[in-house]
Image (cartoon, helix red, strand yellow):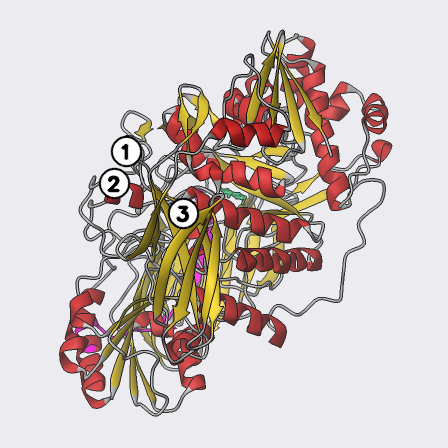
Amino acid sequence: MDDPLNARDLDERLARLSLERKVRLLTGATMFTLRGDEEIGLEPMAFSDGPTGVRGLDFTGGPLTCLFPNATLLASSWRTETAEEVGRLLAEEAERQSIHVVLGPTVNLHRTPLGGRLFEAYSEDPLLTGHLAAAYVSGLQSQGIGACVKHLVANEAETDRHGVDSVVDERTLRELYLLPFEIAVDDADPWSVMAAYNKVNGIAATEQGPVNNGILKGEWGWLGLLMSDWFATQTAAPAANGGLDLVMPGPTGPWGPALVAAVEAGEVEEAVIDDHLRRLLLLASRVGALNAPRAWRTDLPEPGGAVRREQLTRLAAEGMTVLANDGSLPLARGASVALIGRPALETTCMGGGSASVRAPHQVSIADGLTEAMDGVTVVDGVAVRARVRAGQFSMRVRMYGESGALLSDHVSEEARTVGFMPDQELAEPVTRVVMSATVPGGARRIGVLAVGRATVTVGEASYDVTLESESDDIGGDFLRPPGWQTDVVLDGPTELVADVTLGGWAGLGLVAEPTPPTDDDAIAAAVAAASAADIAVVVVGLTEEQETEAFDKSTLALPGRQDELVSAVAAAARRTVVVVNAATPVLMPWASEVDAILWAGLPGQEGGHAVAAALLGDIEPAGRLVTSFPAADGASPAWGVAPTAGKLAYEEGVFVGYRGYAAKRAPAPAYWFGQGLGYGDWEYGEVTLADSVVSVDLTNVSARASREVVQVYLQPTEDDQPIRLVGFSTVSLAPGETRSVEVACDPRASRTWDDGAWRPLTGGRLLVARGLGDIRGEVPVPTGDLEAILAELVGRPLDEASQVVTDAGWQVRTFAPGSMLTMDYREDRMNLEHEDGTVTRAFVG
Ligand code: BGC
């Protein structure tokens, strides 16, 4: 979208506002909205999470909206086209709800497999993450909806997430954790970025002058808006001076009068406030919130309609990843199938926390597969949850205030709600909430989620329970509330009431579900069904208890007795296929006992349809892993997530994930980053290299059309330089077809941060691999005459006075007396650095 603002226009607008009025605009108006100001033509703006659906302005009970496959599943396609399409579709979902900015993508890396929020982020690799993020941002912003790349920076774990200090050396920060942000900024210019909760090397991310002002806004020349993560900002002057532009949420926060006072006391220059506001106005102009309200599109597909079903099924199935296959997959349509496992019936379609949405439906694998083929017998499995879970039905909610007055009486479409929110405009604070619903008869598990005292009544029975807070995290009890449940037998439909006296800010919910079988009964029934069928398909997985914001994992083992279930079924069945319904690495001790393994991620609202399409081969599950799967708990280059004395040291440095495994800093993984079989077979020809482009002839030697991901890794010569992905490309070929595939190597991945500057790596080898466990070819990298290349780029010979500080061969600085010229690799940007260190920035072309 064109930027209608010019400096004069901006200055005129700013001049109309008092300091108080300016500062007022720099804190949110509510949980997810910003204030407008008529005086300067600023319309209110609305933000929504993000990243795998547009939830809208409410945490619970909001409008129905599309639930996309989770980020690791989408990333597993290794296709920027996929990420771009997702961005465009999310923009449509945002338009439907009048949302200006979607809070995504999440570009933090998979540093340790225990990170609770990995499901929301793309990969352990910064290049893959950066390219996918840039494509997602481009898709979103091409429709005039702002992206918000989050969370800047070194925010890879959830334990003590509001206080933890991530200790990361500058090289590691630059080469790994900042790189996805840098690529997104360079390639897609996101209109906003979110500063994380954590500290980085002792300074809060919201006050991180060196990163926010120095790198993001300075070196990278980014003009967007930097907002805080929700409730992250602790200070006025340090945050305002440290580059933070906007405090979220509102209406209150640490800025307001405190920031006005800081300006008046000379601690913050008014020019700094003006810069924050300029960025806010630029965002407003970009999303259509300046001068007039935006005209929202209305001709959009329904979240649960046929168009979205097709799109979301395809996007999910394409990322699913075949980890083992002796030929059992694709399933033969005429086979009789025993479909086993709790996640087959209760498929986990999304992770927990701010990324969750209210989907029109969530198709279970049981429903998806029985719809797609005949001969499926569905059998429940062992328990997979340790915590109480709110039901999937509507309920009546009555909220009462301190005075006993009834403040609200409404029907919630979900059996979960929130007692109170900072921005709820109720006459007085809610102190008591009564939730009720009618429960069908039979053996039922009933219960309540809350923090406080609850009386749960069902028919004649009544239970008094006290539920204590379980988390120090500000949103912990809210995202994962404590719960209580018990099993009852009801004669017929019965009223279930939970009367809760609130004891803290927490999620609330009502539980009512059929009483599940015991684990022993479930295993016995599964074995019987497996022996009677041609093939057993066991679905195992994690749930939003593990795949969640605010909490990390403590193990990669599947919860409950799922491993035992798989082994028992594998011993009894003729053939066994395991479907893993998890977004992140899990341990598979039974891998050698089964015939095929399909990793299915958290597949979104069409999950069951997508798994059926992948199992049957209607859509090829052509995914490749985006993160290494360790062979055992602890067997990864980085593991622990618990800070020591408040500090989480990124001790493994640049040797994260496959970089560390390849350097033998951990036992070999069970499955490598980049691994995935698809349903095709591939022959690779000779690998050649010209001008940073790797070419290889690829032949699909299988009998079906298939998609391959050609991955190029640089193995540098220097010992302290890890192997790293420098390019990738996906290609779909018909059976027997050969094509020359070209992969451009990104110079941003083949440089090192050396003593305060980028230095390109020269020499070494480029490996073409299907994950580092399956290397198909290689080519040496010539140690080229860089200066000659650069002279050509600059258009004249470099003279004696020129010094070359290259950025992987693409950037040149020539020193003239008193100044230094830096040309960006895109040649559309120039920085004139003066001797005193100040920088004049110019955009050209
Ligand atoms: C999360 C952000 C999210 C925000 C708003 C925070 O808890 O860390 O990713 O966008 O809440 O819901």
User: In terms of secondary structure, where does tag 1 sit?
Assistant: loop
Q: Separation of disc 1 and disc 3 at Cα?
A: 20 Å
Give the alpha-carbon distance from disc 3 to disc 2, as whole Å.
18 Å
Q: Earlier in the sequence, mark 2 or mark 1?
A: 2
Q: Considering only order in the chain, which callout, 2 or 3, is on the residue closer to the N terminus?
A: 3
Question: Any mark on residue 117, and which?
Answer: 3
Please give the name of the residue rendered at 25% of the width and 59% of the height, measured from the top-left corner: 559
What are the residue bounds of the magenta stretch?
499-521
In the rendered structure, which amino acid carries the disc numbered 1? Glu
Q: Residues within 10 Å of mark 3 (few under 14, many from 20)?
A: many
To which quarter of the image does residue 831 belong? top right
The image's mark for residue 620 is none
Name the residue beneath numbered marker 2.
Answer: 637
Query: Can residue 111 be spotted in the picture?
Result: yes
What residue sits right under mark 1 in the picture? 652
> Which residue: 24% across, 70% down?
382
Residue 795 pos. (x, y %): 64, 29
Circle 1 packing at 10 Å, graded few (<14), some (14-19), many (20+), is some
Look at label 3 and name its amino acid: Arg
Disc 3: residue Cβ within 8 A of ligand 1's nearest atom: yes
| Residue 413 locus on image (x, y percent) | 56, 65
Closer to the camera, 7 or 48?
A: 7
* Quarter assignment of residue 774: bottom left
> In this picture, is 735 found above or below 796?
below
- What amino acid is found at the position of numbered circle 2 in the picture? Pro
